[in-house]
Image: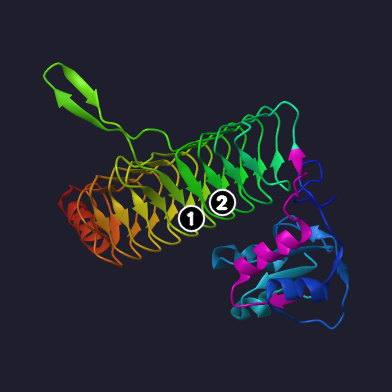
Amino acid sequence: MQPAMTGHTRFFQRSGPHRLSAIAQAAGGAVSSDHDREFEGVAPLQTAGPGQISFLDNRRYASLLDVTRAGAVIVHPNMQSRVPEGAVAIVTPEPYTGWARVAKLFHPAPVGSPGIHPTAVIDEDAVVDPSADIGPLCVIEAGVEIGPGCRIGPAAVIGSGVVLGRDCRIGSHASISHALLGDRVYVYPGARIGQEGFGFAVTKSGFLTVPQLGRVILEDDVEVGANSTVDRGSAGDTVIGVGSRLDNLVQIGHNVVLGRCCIIVAQVGISGSTVLGDFVQVGGQAAMAGHLKIGDGVQIGAQAGVISDVEPGARMLGSPAQPSREFFRQIAMLKKLLPKRD
């Protein structure tokens, strides 16, 4: 049977074939063969053929390694002996990182076509670098600055005064206002950056909207997933720190500050003025109350409800969220108290 092809050419650019030596160099690994043969692409263990590269990072899938037909496999040193005879082991202490780099070798990111589509609407006061790629039906308002190598997808709206650094990518139908973006920021399709935060005063006659006068700062190498929303600050700024990743469908409230390299998984909601330290990880559908401080390196489990400050390095589970040891201790106690079924 013909092996399934990863990265079909209908949708993904391809390069290659590439020699084993170049692949090993990209993976940052050593090889178990002196034969510098060529490989045509990458694929999962269960579908890869002799001309393809695969990888194993999680021991739970070691059984797939035993029967794979891949021509070469990127593995950790402690799994090298499991690589089948006839397959080349590319050995590295970080197999998944190696896989990412090899996949990019075979499937480089698309290169934009500098220029402005004739249907784009660009204010005469905007500054667009000549190397930028402005797609069809884009709207770029007054005072916008778009840096070198940026790519703006179809029907995106860049509001007045927004600044984009180098090599930013803005997905189709995204909207950005009241924001400053660093270099290599990727805003996925449909995301909303810089809209008004949820701020109002309660009066006897109803609600009075409070002007939201801050900005959104997306620092270098930030990614904001599809249909996510990042509210601008009410008085200060909403800040997403260097290298942080927001999944799809994430809500970031006004004045929230994320530190470096935070991971926020889908459907998380972070209420206004909460501050996260560096390298915080938040599981899907978790929620945080406002005005909290979450320390460096905290891990918050899926669907957790955080209502108080969290010390650095803590692992939190449950709703209301509590340290993981306490959470599992309570679960064990409940199981003891429940009557056993026949």
* Amino acid type assigned to the residue bearing label 2 in the image: Val
Of 266 and 115, the residue lying toward us: 115
First to last magenta residue range:
87-115
Determine if residue 40 is in view: yes
Instruction: Check disc 1 and report the residue beneath it.
Output: 219
Q: How is the image coloured?
A: rainbow
Q: With 151 as the anchor, is 251 left or right in this view? A: left
Q: Residues within 10 Å of mark 2 (few under 14, many from 20)?
A: many
Under tag 2, what secondary structure?
loop
**Residue 181: within the magenta?**
no
Residue at 21%, 48% (x, y): give it.
307
User: Among all residues in the image, which is located at the extreme front?
Assistant: 125
Residue at 33%, 48% (x, y): give it.
256
Q: How many marks?
A: 2
Q: CA distance from mark 2 to mark 1?
A: 7 Å
Tags 2 and 1 touching, CB below 8 Å: yes
Of 291 and 195, the residue lying toward us: 195
